[in-house]
Image (cartoon, coloured by chain):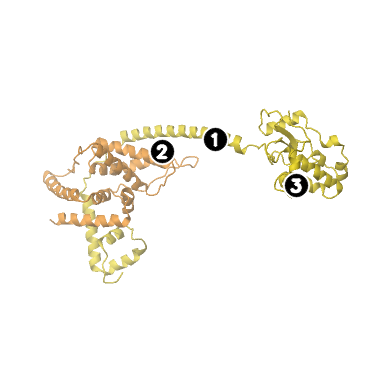
């Protein structure tokens, strides 16, 4: 502001209320030097004091009963809040359950839940794997183990012939007969079903045994993502036509 | 008039969580008297003012429980009280109360002079535009400009300008 300009009344009032903000020092310095602004500030201050003093100084209203009323009201509201909180917890639990059952639970899909089925292999050499009898490579999981896997995947009553209890790393490729290497894979549902995986495993085994592929690499690839392995291996984004009807392992009944 | 608006206390529970009920109760003890005076000055009857004060602080409880902003709570309390009071006044039409202006502890002559001055000032205040009147009444209850702005949803500058207009008019009465 220029030296000859006076502060306006509202500016003086803001200064009196400590709300001049960034210009506070500038205004204080101005008022200290400007007699008119100093006098006006005093007038406004007095007028405000007169106004405040003019209000009736009534005795403070009795507090006891209103305070008790408020406390009762707060108590009631607080109980409502607890009820709302409890209801919210129940709803959250229900919603969580629905979410779990629909999205978060271990999926019984073309890929296993890595938490439940990370894959597991026996300590076998390539020669031992390639020397396995055919029945060793195609053995079915014992019933108790199969039930445990279905239980882990929260499938209470699996529909007959809907799943193949599949090994993530096939026994024919050294996969272990353990829950962490098994998952209920849709038998013929979707394009990435157990028939397609069986076709992949057969081809991988041939290549491992011919020396074209490393056994441990194949096991690791299958454990990580058998569909990605298929796409890389067959250079196809979709299952090849001859693999869609590939029949080898039997469905779970 | 003594300053009734001290610092706002925030209750802390044993587990460190804010005790909202304690906080609301503390604010009620601190702000009830000026809020009641303000509500009465808007024209509410004594019992209605008490109801509105209760409703205001129960709303404050909900406000705090929902984790809503807690800056400028005094302004918030007067804003909610103000709005509830206006609603109640609208419902009740013109059935408003006269605010008793007589101050205790005066001689009859002092009371007569004081009352005559009050009547003049009240006439000036009554003739003010609504917003200016509210600003002035809230300032009389010790609210800072920032709190008045929060209560009436006005900017700081607008509050200051409003008060400047009103003080000029009141000064005329004082001089006369």
- The residue marked by circle 2 belongs to what chain? B
Residue under numbered circle 2: B21
Label 2 environment density (alpha carbons within 10 Å; few <14, some 14–19, many ≥20): many
**Mark nearer the viewer, 1 or 2:** 1
**Residue B72 x %, y %:** 37, 49
Name the element at disc 2.
helix
Look at chain A in the picture and name its colour. Answer: yellow
> Which chain is rendered orange in the image?
B
**Mark nearer the viewer, 3 or 1:** 3
Q: Residue at x 85, y 34 (%)?
A: A135
**Distance (Cα) linking label 3 and label 1:** 36 Å
Is A162 on the left-hand or right-hand side of B14?
Answer: right
**Distance (Cα) linking label 2 and label 3:** 60 Å
Which label's residue is closer to the chain start, 3 or 1? 1
Residue A221 marker:
3
- The residue marked by circle 1 belongs to what chain? A
Name the element at disc 1.
helix
* Quarter of the rendering occupied by the C terminus of chain A: top right
On the question of residue A180 being in view, the answer is no
């Amino acid at each position: 502001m220029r030296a000859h300009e006076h502060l306006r009344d509202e500016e003086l009032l803001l200064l009196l209320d400590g709300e001049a903000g960034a210009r506070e020092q500038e205004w204080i310095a101005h008022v200290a030097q400007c007699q008119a602004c100093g006098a006006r500030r005093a007038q406004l201050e007095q007028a405000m004091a007169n106004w405040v003093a003019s209000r009736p100084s009534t005795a403070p209203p009795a507090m006891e009963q209103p305070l008790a009323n408020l406390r009762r009201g707060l108590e009631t509201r607080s109980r409502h809040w607890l009820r709302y909180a409890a209801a919210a917890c129940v709803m959250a639990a229900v919603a969580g359950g629905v979410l779990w059952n629909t999205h978060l639970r271990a999926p019984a899909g073309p890929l296993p839940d890595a938490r439940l089925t990370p894959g597991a292999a026996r300590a076998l050499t390539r020669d031992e794997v390639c020397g396995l009898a055919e029945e060793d490579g195609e053995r079915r999981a014992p019933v108790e183990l199969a039930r445990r896997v279905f239980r882990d995947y929260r499938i209470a009553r699996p529909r007959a012939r809907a799943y193949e209890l599949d090994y993530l790393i096939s026994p024919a490729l050294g996969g272990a007969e353990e829950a962490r290497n098994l998952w209920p894979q849709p038998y013929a549902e979707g394009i990435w079903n157990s028939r397609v995986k069986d076709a992949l495993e057969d081809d991988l085994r041939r290549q491992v045994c011919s020396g074209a592929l490393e056994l441990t690499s194949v096991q690791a690839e299958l454990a990580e993502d058998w569909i990605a392995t298929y796409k890389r291996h067959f250079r196809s984004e979709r299952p090849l036509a001859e693999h869609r009807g590939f029949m080898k392992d039997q469905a779970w009944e | 008039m003594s300053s009734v608006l001290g610092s706002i206390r925030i209750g802390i529970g044993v587990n460190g969580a804010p005790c909202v009920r304690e906080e609301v109760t503390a604010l009620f003890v601190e702000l009830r008297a000026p809020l009641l005076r303000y509500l009465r000055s808007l024209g509410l009857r004594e019992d209605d003012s008490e109801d509105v004060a209760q409703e205001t602080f129960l709303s404050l409880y909900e406000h705090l429980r929902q984790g809503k902003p807690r800056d400028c709570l005094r302004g918030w309390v007067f804003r909610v009280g103000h709005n509830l009071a206006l609603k109640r006044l609208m419902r009740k039409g013109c059935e408003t109360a006269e605010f008793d202006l007589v101050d205790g502890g005066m001689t009859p002559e002092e009371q007569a002079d004081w009352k005559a001055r009050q009547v003049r000032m009240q006439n000036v205040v009554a003739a003010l535009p609504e917003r200016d009147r509210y600003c002035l009444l809230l300032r009389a209850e010790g609210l800072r400009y920032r709190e008045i702005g929060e209560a009436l949803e006005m900017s700081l500058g607008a509050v200051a300008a409003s008060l400047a207009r009103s003080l000029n008019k009141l000064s005329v009465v004082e001089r006369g």
